[in-house]
Amino acid sequence: MKPKAISQIKSMTSIFKLLALTLTVVLFNCKNETIDMEYKFSNMPEAVTCEVTNKKLYQEALYSFEMDILNFYGKNNRNENALPNLTYAYNLFVRNAIYSRVPYESVVSQHSLEVFKALKNDNTLWDAENTKSHLNYDSDVISCIAKNIKNENLNTSFNALLSIDDLSPKLFGAPLASNSKNALSDKHLATYIALDLYYSKLFDVDLTTIAPKAQEPKMEKVDFNKVPKNNSSS
């Protein structure tokens, strides 16, 4: 073979390698898309205390979720002058969620949709083969939650279901509904509720039909009154 032909072949080989490398980089960047999102709740208490990936995002997800349910479920219709109450909101949301009665398209805010878009990029958080929930129960954040739920009965139930691969919103829902107020003083429990009963459910909602709304009232105007005292057995 002539030297010129050999040189051309080497040149073409180099071009193909460069194209392959470029394509690989493009595909990798697409899969790990960076979401440009405003973090509104960075000054709030940590959602999870363990060192897990996307810790800041989980915190944003929790408080954005709480604002959504506060706006939708927090108002006591019997007292028009009362401020939205998160205890009331958690009670109604959890009870409706475990019976699939939450109108997510009416509850979710624009900010929570942006948070959900970012959460979808977390490959460790979701499990496409989980028929009970889209959530990956083997993820680091779930392991962290399992170790840190404060209420003794809820902790026992959660870990028992997790150990036999039977954890689901439906099975954990009964003890959770009776103790939903604990979410106010237990941010690990609250994070589970946010991930499994809220964001996980958004996979099943046609988001293109939603006219998302802004989050009101602002956090400082919210009545987070009567946060229950820390009680490990109730």
Image (spheres, rainbow, N blue to C red):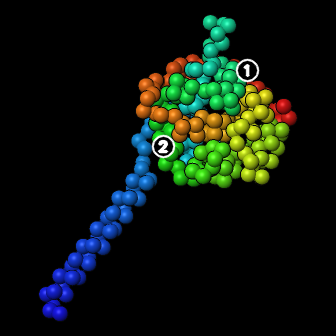
Query: In 3D space, how far apart are the residues under numbered discs 2 and 1 (Cα atoms)?
Result: 32 Å
Callout 1 secondary element? loop
Q: Could you say which is closer to the camera, residue 34 or residue 230?
A: 34
- Quarter of the N terminus within the rendering: bottom left
Along the line of sight, which residue is nearer the eye, 19 or 49? 19
Res 97 quadrant in image: top right
Query: Where is residue 226 drawn, in percent x and y?
Result: 73, 20
Task: Left or right? Give the position of 21 relative to 151.
Answer: left
Q: Quadrant of residue 177?
A: top right
Q: Secondary structure at mark 2?
A: helix
Residue to which mark 1 is pinned: 226
Q: Would you call the spot at circle 2 few (<14 residues within 10 Å), some (14-19), or many (20 or more)? A: some
| Rendering coords of residue 121 (x, y %) | 49, 48
Would you name the residue on which mark 2 appears? 118
Q: Which of these two is toward me, 122 or 53?
A: 122
Residue 39 percent location from the top left of the image: 49, 36
Upstream in sequence: badge 2 or badge 1: 2
User: In which image quadrant can residue 224 be found?
Assistant: top right
Instruction: Work out whether residue 51 can be spotted.
Output: no
Q: Is residue 65 above or below residue 143?
A: above
Mark 1 neighbour class, 10 Å CA radius: few under 14, some 14 to 19, many 20 or more: few
Q: Residue at x 37, y 64 (%)?
A: 24
Count of marks, rendered view: 2
